[in-house]
Image (cartoon, rainbow, N blue to C red):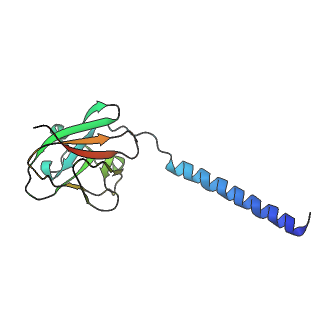
């Protein structure tokens, strides 16, 4: 074998091995067992951030939890999160980088981690609103707010 051919084979082998180890590391990092969201609450300014039974999400199917609450349209945003009773980091769901407003009927992806940021909603009208927590993609839940039939 020529010296150049040997160098080419060694370089190619290193690239292949490097790619394999990087892919394996990514798979280990991204793997996460399905989370069990059965004890989640809507926690925010409307309930002093408490985990009270009145604000516990109800499972309506294997992939959906909901709660309907009354909100007053006073022009101010309601800050809230979806979280369990003990604020466990992996069940502290909000936005990834900064507090952000959600609009009626828009599905927004939430992150569930210690540093998640508040969700904000400003109702245009006073009334009942349903908060739908979709866990069909278990590790990337979505939230949608709809106007309930009053």
The quadrant of the rendering that contains the C terminus is top left
**Figure quadrant of residue 132:** top left
From the viewer's perspective, is 148 left or right of 37?
left
Q: Is 13 placed left or right of 124 in the picture?
A: right
In the image, residue 24 sits, relative to residue 1, either above or below, namely above
Task: Kindly identify the residue that appears in the image at 35 percent across and 58 percent down.
Answer: 96
Q: Residue at x 17, y 39 (%)?
A: 68
Q: What residue do we see at 43% from left, 39% from top?
A: 34
As rendered, which of 102 and 11 lies closer to the eye? 102
Image quadrant where residue 8 sits? bottom right
The answer, for residue 10, to whether it is visible in the render is yes
Q: Position of residue 139 (x, y in %)?
A: 41, 45
Q: Position of residue 2 (x, y in %)?
A: 91, 66
Measured as percent of width and height from the top left, residue 29 is found at 52, 51
Coordinates of residue 80 in the picture (x, y in percent): 21, 52
Identify the residue at image location x=61%, y=56%. 22
Q: Is residue 1 above or below residue 45?
A: below
The outermost residue toward the bottom is: 4
Q: Which quadrant: the N terminus?
A: bottom right
How many numbered badges does the structure rendering display?
0
On the rendered structure, is 78 left or right of 31? left
- Residue 57 in sight from this viewpoint: no
Given residues 12 and 45, the one toward you in this image is 12
Query: Against 17, is 62 above or below?
Result: above
* Residue, far top: 61
């Amino acid at each position: 074998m020529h010296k150049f051919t040997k160098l080419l084979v060694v370089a190619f082998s290193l690239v292949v091995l490097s790619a394999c180890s990087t892919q394996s590391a990514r798979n280990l990092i991204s793997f996460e067992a399905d989370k069990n969201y059965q004890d989640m609450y809507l926690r925010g300014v409307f309930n002093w951030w408490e985990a009270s039974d009145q604000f516990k999400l109800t499972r309506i199917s294997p992939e959906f939890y909901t709660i309907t609450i009354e909100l007053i349209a006073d022009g101010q945003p309601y800050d809230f999160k979806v979280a369990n009773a003990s604020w466990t980091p992996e069940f502290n769901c909000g936005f990834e980088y900064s507090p952000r407003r959600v609009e009626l009927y828009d599905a927004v992806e939430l992150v569930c981690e210690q540093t998640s940021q508040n969700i904000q909603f400003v109702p245009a009208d006073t009334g009942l609103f349903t908060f739908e927590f979709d866990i069909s993609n278990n590790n990337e839940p979505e939230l949608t707010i709809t106007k309930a039939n009053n």
